Amino acid sequence: MSQGSPGDCVPLEPTSGPSTPPNPFVHELHLSRLQRIKFCLLGALLAPIRVLLAFIVLFLLWPFAWLQVAGLSEEQLQEPLTGWRKTVCHNGVLGLSRLLFFLLGFLRIRVRGQRASRLQAPVLVAAPHSTFFDPIVLLPCDLPKVVSRAENLSVPVIGALLRFNQAILVSRHDPASRRRVVEEVRRRATSGGKWPQVLFFPEGTCSNKKALLKFKPGAFIAGVPVQPILIRYPNSLDTTSWAWRGPGVLKVLWLTASQPCSIVDVEFLPVYHPSPEESRDPTLYANNVQRVMAQALGIPATECEFVGSLPVIVVGRLKVAFEPQLWELGKVLRKAGLSPGYVDTGAEPGRSRMINQDEFARQLQLSDPQTVAGAFSYFQKDANGLVDFRDVALALAALDRGTGLEELTRLAFELFAEEQAEGPSRLLCSDGFSTILHLLLGSPRPAAETLHAELCQAGPHQGLSLCQFQDFSLRDPLHGKLFSTYLRPSQTPNASSPGSCPALANGTVHSPKQKGD
């Protein structure tokens, strides 16, 4: 299968249209007056009973989960369980789990296609991952093993179920843990059918089902065949989606439990056998499986993903935030009546000046404690809780619409360029470059550092001159348009004409949507 390059682009549109996928991180639930009345009545009568009974069943799962692993050592748990523990406890958990989802309103699980055996496909990949109800896919898959955060072991009942499942645990804060998980996935996937199948949600986080997020390579590292599984909720009203922007956990749970009947479609696609190139390259393998699943779902395959807690999209060789924190900072300051152009920052070029929250408030002439705390939180702090005032100066200049893009990029260079002992007097090194892109575009620092290294390969120095930086930020065919869209959208040419606005790889950038919009 052919692989599209990261530069495959579609033109920016002011709103999502047929040629551009919608923001997959936003879910807006619009209820008519009649629907509100129905949910009020059913929510008052049906939802409390369902949720209460479901929690009772959830706690009834604990004895079965505990019994399967009781008295077993860690060494014994490194091998698949057999005998009465497997038969009694597995069937007990499977039956109670189906009852739990039934009580929550999922009266029907419609299965299409044929699940492959563990020899045919040691790994299962399910998408789109759109809700915390998605573990329902475990039922038609006969409770395969899962990968979960190690922190979940301390959650009551959930921790016991993970031990029962012999889940592969990963700590997001420990790089060594990630390596162990890779080795364990490979060990189980290549056991020749000895271990049950391992289930992955390769998107790694929830979206609104309107587009597939970029697949993480973890499920594909072993290079073994995988079986894609599609999850659909074909209900008249989408109450299940739990995206980055949208209804919270309690509202999603309450609205779904208030539905008379919720339906889930689980479709098993044919087993995907990797080519030799895909077996050697997990990223290529993941991208191609993502495309197959997106085509079957009839939705776009995107480069969107989460980096930390921030949703980003790939633009050329750079990752940028869907909603840069600069936009949020501007809202806070405008609400406080502050005009960024009238603030005298007095930042010194090339020299950091660390300030605390009180000095920040004095400099910006802010008096409301909530506004001060909100604005101060948008800047990266050091170990002592201080921020670099150069960051503040650049952010305020970017928010000042009276500052032109050429003047803004020159100021950014002057603030963060470093003096050189040899060669050009001042160069923008990796740290300053990543700080600028993080502040202005919301780019994750590792991605910006990688791009800086690539840009420096064309020159004799490990830094960028002012001319090189402005060539990248103002005159580059793709990234230059990106800067103008994020920082000066009112100065951008007509967005409806193809090629006149930044082209984003398989996605769009538009004004951020907040909850309740």
Image (cartoon, rainbow, N blue to C red):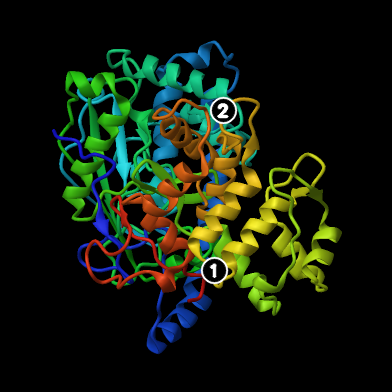
Q: Secondary structure at mark 1?
A: helix
Give the residue displayed 37% in from the left and 69% down from the top: 492
Give the residue displayed 20% in from the left and 52% down from the top: 297
Q: Is residue 144 above or below residue 484?
A: above
Q: How many marks?
A: 2
Quadrant hosting residue 79 = top left
Q: Nearer the viewer, mark 1 or mark 2?
A: 2
State the image coordinates of residue 312 (x, y, percent, origin top left). Answer: 44, 50
Amino acid type of disc 2?
Gly
Q: Label 1 belongs to which residue?
A: 48
Would residue 288 appear left or right of 89 to someone viewing this image?
left
Task: Compare residues 321 and 216 and report the one nearer the observer.
Answer: 321
Give the residue displayed 55% in from the left and 41% down from the top: 434
Q: Cα distance, mark 1 to mark 2?
A: 72 Å
**Residue 50 visible in the shown view:** no
Amino acid type of disc 1?
Pro
State the image coordinates of residue 162 (x, y, percent, origin top left). Answer: 52, 33
Are there few (<14), some (14-19), or many (20+) residues within 10 Å of tag 1? some
Would residue 479 appear left or right of 431 to someone viewing this image?
left
Checking the image for residue 423, the label placed there is: 2
Q: Secondary structure at mark 2?
A: loop
Give the residue displayed 17% in from the left and 26% down from the top: 273
Mark 1 / mark 2, whichever is N-terminal: 1
In the rendered image, which quarter contains the N terminus? top left
